[in-house]
Image: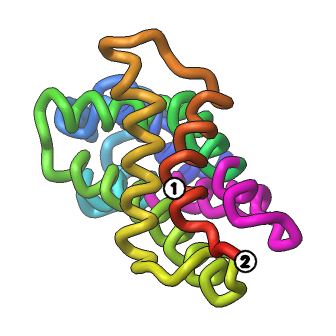
């Protein structure tokens, strides 16, 4: 097996189990079953190792976008497919779950930066698609940065924040509310 890949897999497991703050190079070496010096042949610091893993996650997310977006479909159909896929990816990806917990509980700068990078991938996709939909007159004129921000925050609020004090909404109920507030308000009227 490729040693670098072995180190990355071990580090990914360690960060997912212990978070950024509690992961050490000794732990990664033990999980990878290599000497600590082997890690340092590929990565100078824990930060570099972590960044490489986060970049891998972001690449996976970009693949989701490419897989889910069909420009023959309407903007909101694509939006819902991508957001559903991202939510599923995020809820099943142990590293993102742990980083979200670490961000909430400890607030390490590295977990904050990683989660911001993940959110920026989503925001960037939506912003670009809003611009495209406006230019095709599928949506009315708007500020794509603000609209993408509101869409993501509303989706996160309805998929996770709401559940803290209320019965969880189904995917269809979430889509109904997003349609009510965003699609009907942004749709270009003939």
Residue nearer the viewer, 21 or 115: 115
Q: Residue furthest right?
A: 72
Q: Which residue is mark 2?
A: 190
x and y, in percent, of residue 126 in the image: 54, 67
| 59 vs 121, nearest the viewer | 121
Q: Earlier in the sequence, mark 2 or mark 1?
A: 1
Report the mark closest to the observer, 2 or 1.
2
The answer to whether residue 106 is left or right of residue 25 is: left
Residue at (25% x, 57% y) in the render: 113
Instruction: Identify the element where label 2 is drawn.
Output: loop
Q: Compared to 174, does 182 lie above or below? A: below
Q: Callout 1: 10 Å neighbours few (<14), some, many (20+)?
A: some
Q: Is residue 84 above or below residue 165?
A: below
- The residue sitting at 15% across, 27% down in the picture is 105
Name the spot of residue 123 as percent of width and height, x first.
Answer: 45, 65
Query: Which stretch appears magenta?
Result: 54-80
Question: What x and y, as percent, mark residue 146?
Answer: 35, 70
Residue 100 left/right relative to 132: left
């Amino acid at each position: 097996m490729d040693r670098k890949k072995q180190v990355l897999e071990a580090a990914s497991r360690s960060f997912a189990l212990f978070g950024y703050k509690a992961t050490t190079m000794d732990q990664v070496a033990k999980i990878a079953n290599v000497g600590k010096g082997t890690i340092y042949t590929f990565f100078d610091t824990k930060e570099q190792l972590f960044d490489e893993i986060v970049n891998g996650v972001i690449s996976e997310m970009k693949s989701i976008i490419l897989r889910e977006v069909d420009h023959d479909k309407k903007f909101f159909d694509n939006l819902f497919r991508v957001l559903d896929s991202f939510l599923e990816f995020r809820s099943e990806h142990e590293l993102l779950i742990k980083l979200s917990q670490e961000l909430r509980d400890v607030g390490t700068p590295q977990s904050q930066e990683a989660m911001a990078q993940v959110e920026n991938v989503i925001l960037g996709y939506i912003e670009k698609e809003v611009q495209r939909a406006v230019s095709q007159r599928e949506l009315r004129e708007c500020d794509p940065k603000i609209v993408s921000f509101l869409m993501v925050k509303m989706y996160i609020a309805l998929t996770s924040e709401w559940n803290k004090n209320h019965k969880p909404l189904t995917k269809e109920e979430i889509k109904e509310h997003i349609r009510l507030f965003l699609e009907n308000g942004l749709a270009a009227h003939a």
